[in-house]
Structures are given as C-alpha cells and as structure tokens.
Amino acid sequence: MNNLPISISILFVVTTLVTIWQFYKAANSSKKVLVYLLAWTLAQGLIGLTGFYKVTQTLPPRFVLLIGPAIIFITILFVTKKGRVFIDALNIRKLTLLHSVRIPVEITLYFIYAAGFIPVLMTFEGNNYDIISGITAPIIFYLVFIFKKLGNKALLLWNFLCLGLLFNIIVIAILSAQTPFQVLAFEQPNIGVTYFPFVWLPSAVVPIVLLSHLAAIRQLLRSIKTKNNLQ
C-alpha cells in the first residue's frame, strides 16, 4: 500500500494491541485469554503477509476466513455453559471503555480510503457512523460508572445502538469486498483489509468489539431481570 503513510500502519498496529490489552484486562487479566488472542492475531498477521487474502476471486471467498472463525468461536461461547460463565465474568466497566478504540480505527479507515483501498462508504464521510461509538464510550463510562448519572437501562440502550452501528459497517465491508458476491463499491472495492496489518481489523478488532457488546448486553439483561424480580 504505497500511497498509505507508514504512520497509519503503526497507528493501527498500536490500536490492535490496545484492543487486545483492554479485553485482557476486562477478562480479569486472564493470561490464557491473552495468549489465545495474541496467538490468533499473530497467525492472521503471518497469513496476511503471505498475500493469501489478496486472492479475491475464489469460492468460498478467502475473506470469510478473516472473520468467520471468530464468529464461530463467539457463538460457541454463548451456547456452552463454560462459555457463558466466561462471558458473565467479564468486567463490564472495562468492556465499555474498550470501545474508545473505534476512534483510531475510523481514522485508519479514512486514510485507507484516501489511499484508494476501501470505498468511501466504509468511512465517516460515507455510511459508516461507528466513530460515534468510540466518541461516546468514555462519556457513557463516566456517566454510568463514575458519576452515577445513568443506570443499566441507559447502558443497555447504548450497547444496542452501538451494536447496530457495528453491524452496519460489517455489512458494508462484506458487500463491498472484492469477492464473487460483491454488490457495492465496484469503482473502489474493499481490498484494504486483505493487506497486513489491516487483516487484523476483521479478524481481531471487530470480533473483540462485537463480543464486548454482546457480553455487556447479556450481563445487563440478566441484571435488569433480576432487579425486576426482586421488586
């Protein structure tokens, strides 16, 4: 990606590492979680360096291997008893603050677009409003957990809204990816995430952000239900 400043690649590497570190802290500093996340991220990075994901016209699309395994793993967490125990033990305060990483992610996406590797649809100048989640994350954190001005219902609503913003960009990214199933952005398709280190966006950062929302929503729904039953 010759048109992209090296500083943007460095920014994204740091963002990925911060995302992993934040989730590790949310998982009560579980060394097992940290090892798994780093191993998966390293493996995807090495695959990305080989140019494997740049081959786009295959069936099934190799793009699926960037996010598919993580989605399957998240599903397993929610359908197994041990997985649900893990999810319910995550620190919701740290999960909320984790979403601040979406600010540098969106800055990165803008520069990748400017370099000609993703469509404008995937940036805040197009149809991607995910930066709102990153900007509001610290605000919500302080209003709910520090100043106690908002409660669980407000936090739940925020998580649902930001999850919707996440799904919006995921759909746009998939539909604009250069695969046999592409339906958007033919003039400038989404090929940026097939390059290292940006393969870590769909394979590491997005799954962690997704799991953080889903885990928080599960915890909040259980908490609100318990509170209502006691009244």
Image: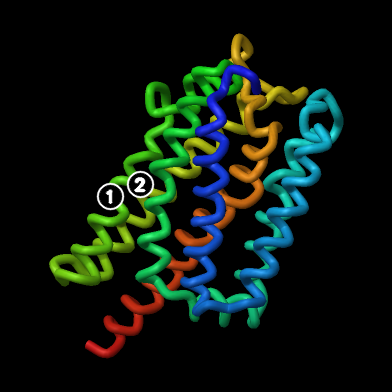
Disc 1 on helix, strand or loop?
Answer: helix
Q: Is residue 227 left or right of residue 125?
A: left
Q: Is residue 184 left or right of residue 215?
A: right
* Quarter of the figure that contains the C terminus: bottom left
Pinpoint residue 221: horizontal percent, then vertical percent.
38, 71
Pinpoint residue 31: horizontal percent, then vertical percent.
62, 77
Pinpoint residue 46: horizontal percent, then vertical percent.
78, 46
At x 63%, y 72%, the residue is 33
- Crowd band around label 1 with a 10 angstrom C-alpha radius: few (<14), some (14–19), many (20+): some
Badges 2 and 1: C-beta atoms under 8 Å apart?
yes
* Quarter of the figure that contains the N terminus: top right
Q: Is residue 175 left or right of residue 29?
A: right
Q: Amino acid at mark 1?
A: Thr
Position above or below: 197 against 19: above
**Which residue is nearer to you in this view: 114 or 66?**
114
The residues bearing labels 2 and 1 have C-alpha atoms spaced at a distance of 5 Å
Position above or below: 5 against 99: above
Pinpoint residue 127: horizontal percent, then vertical percent.
42, 26
**Which residue is nearer to you in this view: 2 or 210?**
2
Q: Amino acid at mark 2?
A: Ser
Position above or below: 154 against 201: below
**Which residue is nearer to you in this view: 59 or 195?**
195
> What number is the disc on residue 120?
none
Position above or below: 52 against 2: below
Residue at which label 1 appears: 136
At x 36%, y 61%, the residue is 97
**Which residue is nearer to you in this view: 13 or 153?**
13
Choose top left, top right, bottom left or bottom right for residue 175.
Answer: top right
> What number is the disc on residue 133?
2
Disc 2 on helix, strand or loop?
Answer: helix
Choose top left, top right, bottom left or bottom right for residue 216.
Answer: bottom left
